[in-house]
Image: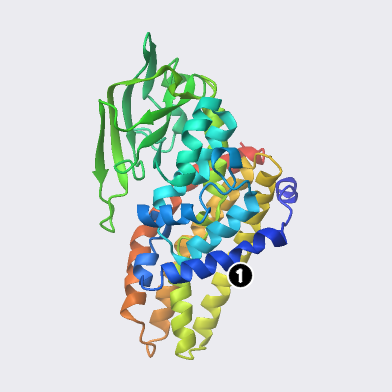
Amino acid sequence: MTSTLTSLPLAGIPPEDEALRAEVRGWLTQALRDVPADVRSRSWLGYDLAFSRALARQGWIGLTLPREYGGAGRGSFARFVLSEELLAAGAPVAAHWIADRQTAQLILRFGSEAQRQFFLPRIARVDIVFCIGMSEPDTGSDLASVRTRATRTADGWLLNGRKIWTTNAHRADYMCALVRTSGSAEDRHQGLSQVLVDMKLPGVSVRPLRDIAGDTHFNEVLFDNVLLPPDAVLGEEGAGWRQVTAELAFERSGPERVYSSIVLADTWLAEVRAAGLQTPAVRATAGRIAGRLAVLRGMSLAVAAKLERGERPDLEAAFVKDLGTEFEQAVPELIRETLEATPDFAPSAELMRSLAYVTQISPTFSLRGGTRQIMRGIIARGLGLR
């Protein structure tokens, strides 16, 4: 444990990147001034293509991409500041989040020059929306057991199989999918590749899945003899497992694994402050939220520093994801218990709607990006315990 923790030293945001915060916060204050807390609580699950394109016009999508590909050429800390402000404000970022956070980084690192030239400027303008095809029916969180197969043909690749829990597949233009290009599911990590799939191709069908909160951002995707072009493979054929683990480090370590309940927390805190409520229960809950958030933010910043240095923080990202989602799930329960302990306080209808939504959706926090059991398995292996 000691060696792992010492490999994640504290990091601070450089002044030039911290300077971005005031500009972003001011812009968001205006853009979201009429949006209630229960809507903003959806944050990175909130889909608003016009909003994402407005961010792109500000130069805030593709922030870390090189300028020759339409990006701003900034570093990981600048994107951390931007992400923090977007999530803290409850901005609807789902239209660009996946592509900006991880798919663009994958294409930049592993893609061909033709793939970079085609996809990266379009991602930076939010001209295209990406989804990610990882999980499959009947395999749970065992990502290495994928059965969806791309078979080489004279004209390219023939894709058959199914993906499930695919966020925004019903809105996406492209999917980055983990598939098997050789061997069988028993071969585990061998024979896996990533392919870029045009979602408008014949044979692709999408079935939305409604969640407990009534939203339909999850989907099942079926591939029935979908003909992909020869250049559909991203990176090296058979290197999909190495690539997808690098991708998951981006997905698991960011502020969205800490801040999913932050709009609810801020709304509750603003209301108890306005009411002058300083009971022991209120102070204890505020302290617990602030203390855990400070630690998790520090860990997430340390991972951003490793990314800035070009390192692969797979293990550290798993720590952040596991502890972060545990915190996110604890926030609505802490606030509910505190409301029960302060019967003289009258919360607003907006706060109660926000609490109801986050309470309903919070069980998914520990599923997305890998279940808690998977995270703890990764951590155990990294610590030499299994």
Q: Mark 1 highlights which residue?
A: 291
Foreground pick, 136 / 1 = 136
Q: Can residue 369 be seen?
A: no
| Residue at screen point 46% across, 42% down | 123
Q: Is residue 13 left or right of residue 253?
A: right
Amino acid, disc 1: Gly
| Above-or-below relation of 178 to 83 | above
Q: Position of residue 199 (x, y in %)?
A: 32, 33
Q: Alpha-carbon neighbours of circle 1 within 10 Å: few (<14), some, or many (≥20)? A: few
Q: Position of residue 367 (x, y in %)?
A: 42, 48
Foreground pick, 87 / 321 = 87
Q: Can residue 61 be seen?
A: yes
Foreground pick, 350 / 361 = 350
Q: Is residue 275 left or right of residue 19?
A: left
Q: Position of residue 230 (x, y in %)?
A: 42, 17
| Residue at screen point 62% across, 42% down | 315
